[in-house]
Amino acid sequence: MTTPRLVDHFFRHEYGRMVSVLSRQVGVQHIDAVEDAVQSALMKSLDVWTASTVPDNPSAWLFRVARNELMGNLREGTRHRHLIERHQSDVAASEEVEGRMSGDVQDDLLRMLFVCCDTEIPIESQLVFALKILCGFGIREIAVQLFTTEANVYKRFARARSRLRKDPLPVNELTHEQLTLRLPAVTKILYVLFTEGYLSSHGEIAIRHELCSEAIRLATILAEHPLGAVPETFALLALMHLHSARLDARQDALGDLLLLEEQDRSLWDRQAIQSGLQWLAKSAHGDHFSRYHAEAGIAAEHCLAASFDETRWEKVADCYALLERLAPSPLHMLNRAIAVAEWQGPRAGLDVLNGAEPPRWLAESYLWSAVLADLNRRCGNVVVAEGHRDKALESAPTPAVTALLKRRFNAS
């Protein structure tokens, strides 16, 4: 692995963890200084590792450089001297962290997610802040995942940062009630983290396995904690495992994305499917039924079907109808139309969308146009289909999605 790719690898893996640890030590109100120090460490690694050799423990090297940079910057301001003294024990103790970055840091990242999910901050801003600061997402990546503009992402990020600067609450001071109130926001962040890994908005990477693994790891820690051991968390884990089971089959030998019907099902990870089904069964206890239950049910139908044609599409359509009631979104209606088209034919699928006026964010998305192009083509509406096809290709967010759409339309 070349040095630039190695640095990029550690940026994706270590950025959020280092920010979490250092923020815990000095306080989240100093998040700007923390982020600057971490970014500086990553830039220095590019220079140092290129000029010499990569250290035996790159994670510890990055953490030490970032910590020294942060403490040096804070010492420059006399008003921060008390902060340095107060956290001197944490700084000394962090020497141990260098040798075991996979231990305390994992918990710190999850703790910091709860800090970011302050109920005084709008949920959209909580999500943006956590994805950018703790998960290492870029502004464009967040905008694509949340179906919004980059300008809105900047605004939401600024709103959350302002609140956390003004009145930060250390994670060890959060009450059980506060943690419980923040749990849904934390699970949503983990959901988006996994989603970005499953179909990346990154221009050069179609699937980001490390994000899927990180989301599963954090969700597992959450599910094993009394606070997070609830059906909704279990259902989210089921969804993640069932989707991750298909990851290796979602790309061909050249790295191009494959449609569900094109995938070699013998490549699906049976152990991951079994884990997903076990979490799904565990999530069935109690009366609570969340959107994650419905989505996991859809994923289970796909994983259990012997072939694409043998999928129980009526069950998939029913799950999407449930999703529309649980978490109203035109995206669920769009997916229900796809399932209905496979179940009852393309005309029935178009009937689901008949008269629908999607919001601007969806109307401008490739998803809406691609589905209309496919259904109209299958119904023989060639001219209409071509118009939607062109719009879908124009609005595709990444080269990988563009290539997938072209192959789909050319095969039509």
Image (spheres, rainbow, N blue to C red):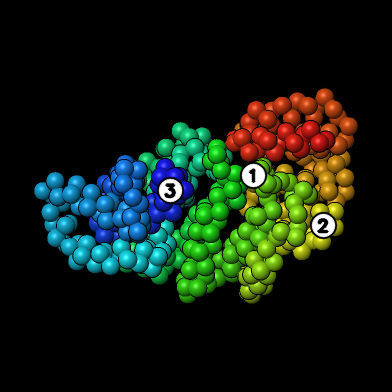
What crowding class fits label 3: few (fewer than 14 Cα within 10 Å), some (14-19), or many (20 or more)? some
Q: How far apart are marks 1 and 3 (CA)?
A: 20 Å
What crowding class fits label 1: few (fewer than 14 Cα within 10 Å), some (14-19), or many (20 or more)? few
What type is the residue that disc 2 sits on? Ser
> In the rendered image, which residue does mark 1 sit on?
255
Q: Which callout, 2 or 3, points to the residue nearer the camera?
A: 3
Image quadrant containing the C terminus: top right
Q: How far apart are marks 1 and 2 (CA)?
A: 23 Å
Q: Where is residue 339 in the image (x, y as percent from the top left)?
A: 79, 50
- Determine the residue positioned at 85% across, 53% down: 309
- Determine the residue positioned at 47% across, 48% down: 1
Which residue extends farthest left?
Answer: 78
Q: Is tag 1's residue or tag 2's residue first in the polypeptide sequence?
A: 1
> In the rendered image, which residue does mark 2 sit on?
307
Q: In which quarter of the image is residue 109?
A: bottom left
Q: In this view, does 5 lie to the left or right of 273?
A: left
Q: Distance between the residues labelled 2 and 3?
A: 39 Å
Nearer to us in this view, 388 or 60: 60
Nearer to us in this view, 3 or 233: 3
| Tag 1 and tag 2, C-beta contact below 8 Å | no
Q: Where is residue 351 in the image (x, y as percent from the top left)?
A: 83, 41
Q: Where is residue 200 in the image (x, y as percent from the top left)?
A: 57, 45
| Tag 1 and tag 3, C-beta contact below 8 Å | no
> In the rendered image, which residue does mark 3 sit on?
6
Q: Is residue 344 left or right of residue 172?
A: right
Q: In which quarter of the image is residue 3?
A: top left
The label on residue 72 is: none
Q: Is tag 2's residue or tag 3's residue first in the polypeptide sequence?
A: 3
Q: Is residue 237 visible?
A: yes
